[in-house]
Each structure stands twice: as C-alpha cells, then as structure tokens.
C-alpha cells in the first residue's frame, strides 16, 4: 500500500488526513526502520506493508468506534506504538497514555513522540497488572486499546480495570476472534465488561482477516483485579 492508496482507502472510510498528518506517518516509518536495526520492534519493515499492516490496521479501530468524542485513551502493550500513535496522528485531540513493559520500546516511543511533536502523550514503563492497580490510572480512561498482546481472556484482565464505567475496551484481533470471545465470556462478566460487537473484516490488498471487538465497561472491576504480574497469563479467569 503506497501513500496515495493509504489516503484513498482512509477517505473511503470518511477518515481524511492532511499533508501534515501524512508527513507524520512518513516520519514514523523512517524512525521505525531506523530503530528496528538496533531494537526488535517489528518483523514488518517494507514501506507498503508497514502502511497497510501497522498504520492502516491500527486505524481500523476508528471505523467501528468513534474517536471524535473520546478524550482519553490508554494503549496496553503498545510495542512500537500500535494502535495508539496512528490514532493520535489522525485524532490530535486525544490524550494518550501508552504502557509497555520493555524499556527499549519505551525509549523508541519517547523519541517518536519528540520527532512527531505529539502533545498529550504519556509514555509509561510498566506492566499492565501494576498500572491497573495504580489509583492514578485505574478506571480512568474513556477507551483502552490493545493489539496483538494476548488472548482475550487474559487481555480483559489487563485492560478492563483501566477503563472507566461507561467507557470501552477495544481489542484489535486477527482471525478466530469468535473462539476467543467464547473463551473470555467468564472473564468479561467478572471484570465488568459486556461485548457490544465483534466486527470482522479483511484488510485491503492482501485480504487477511481482522476483527475489532468492542466491549463496554458496565460496572466497576473488583479490587482484586488485575492480579499480580504474571498471574493472568498463567491462570486466566
């Protein structure tokens, strides 16, 4: 997907970006490839694939959930900044908090924030289980996102404690999302989440399957969740 096609497919989804925003994506790509030589950020480095499989893929969340009226977003396990940084570029008003447990990725994200001149972006070196028990962040965000982090039964325990009641947890998934939803049914109920919709679609050009799962936070999460670091992955609810 070249830059022209990137803008065209976004426009078809009523997401129109300016030349300045496109330049931010270009700078993002350049920095990603530069840092990837010394820090393992992604296996995808060809420009067209980055624009499709990282940038466009991250923005698909906004096709199924409106970010226009969202104020705060927390991105768990963002890695190289997906999906939160592409969303921030396209929706500059967002106040974004990015959480990742690997310091090398945190350093990249800090440099990215500076290079792209992004304001209201807070980058935190932490495990999801720890920040979820921090009073400053717990149940504080309108939207919590996660992409390619863990299965939904585990991911729900990472994300729902950070989401305010009335907000939403948005999981960006690949194929077999229905299977994960069945597996996560108990966890979602215990943690205060309710599935609104599971939107399955194919990426343009290559047609690989993707899903955007939108989960509303309908009640407070019990104080015992998230459990201590490592427990959700080892012993899912």
Image (cartoon, rainbow, N blue to C red):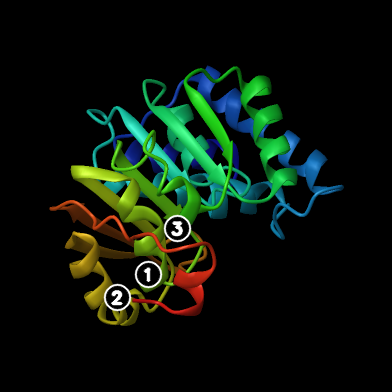
The answer to which of marks 3 and 1 sits earlier in the sequence is 1
Q: CA distance from mark 3 to mark 1?
A: 25 Å
Residue 23 lies, with reference to residue 210, above or below; the image says: above
The reply to whether residue 13 is visible in this rendering is no
Furthest-front residue in this view: 224
Tell us which disc is closer to us: 3 or 2. Answer: 2
Label 1 crowding class (10 Å Cα cut-off): few <14, some 14-19, many 20+?
Answer: many
Residue 195 lies, with reference to residue 75, above or below; the image says: below
Give percent across and percent down for residue 61: 35, 48
Q: Secondary structure under badge 1?
A: helix
- Please tell me the numbered disc located at residue 204: 3
Q: Secondary structure under badge 2?
A: loop
Residue linked to disc 2: 184
Residue under the image location 18 percent in, 69 percent down: 189
Label 3 crowding class (10 Å Cα cut-off): few <14, some 14-19, many 20+?
Answer: some
Tell us which disc is closer to us: 3 or 1. Answer: 1
Q: Is residue 52 left or right of residue 107?
A: left
Q: CA distance from mark 1 to mark 2?
A: 6 Å
Q: Nearer the viewer, residue 194 or 165?
A: 165
The answer to which of marks 3 and 2 sits earlier in the sequence is 2
Q: Quadrant of residue 44?
A: bottom right
Residue under the image location 23 percent in, 77 percent down: 186
Q: Quadrant of residue 20?
A: top right
Give percent across and percent down for residue 234: 51, 78
Q: CA distance from mark 3 to mark 2?
A: 29 Å
Q: Is residue 217 left or right of residue 187?
A: left
Give percent across and percent down for residue 127: 55, 52
């Amino acid at each position: 997907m070249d830059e022209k096609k990137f803008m065209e497919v976004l426009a078809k989804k009523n997401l129109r970006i300016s030349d300045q925003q496109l330049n931010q994506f270009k700078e993002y790509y350049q920095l990603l490839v530069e840092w990837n030589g010394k820090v393992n950020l992604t296996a995808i480095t060809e420009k067209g694939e980055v624009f499709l499989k990282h940038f466009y893929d991250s923005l698909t969340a906004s096709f199924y959930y409106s970010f226009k009226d969202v104020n705060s977003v927390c991105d768990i396990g963002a890695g190289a900044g997906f999906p939160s940084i592409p969303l921030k570029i396209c929706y500059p008003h967002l106040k974004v908090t990015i959480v990742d447990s690997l310091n090398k990725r945190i350093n990249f994200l800090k440099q990215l924030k500076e290079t792209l001149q992004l304001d209201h972006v807070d980058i935190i070196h932490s495990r999801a289980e720890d920040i979820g028990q921090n009073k400053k962040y717990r149940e504080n965000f309108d939207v919590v996102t996660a992409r390619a982090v863990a299965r939904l039964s585990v991911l729900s325990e990472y994300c729902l404690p950070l989401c305010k009641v009335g907000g939403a947890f948005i999981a960006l998934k690949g194929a077999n999302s229905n299977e994960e939803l069945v597996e996560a049914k108990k966890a979602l109920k215990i943690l205060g989440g309710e599935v609104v919709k599971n939107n399955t679609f194919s990426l343009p050009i290559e047609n690989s399957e993707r899903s955007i799962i939108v989960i509303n936070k309908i009640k407070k999460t019990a104080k015992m969740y998230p459990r201590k670091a490592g427990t959700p992955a080892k012993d899912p609810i």
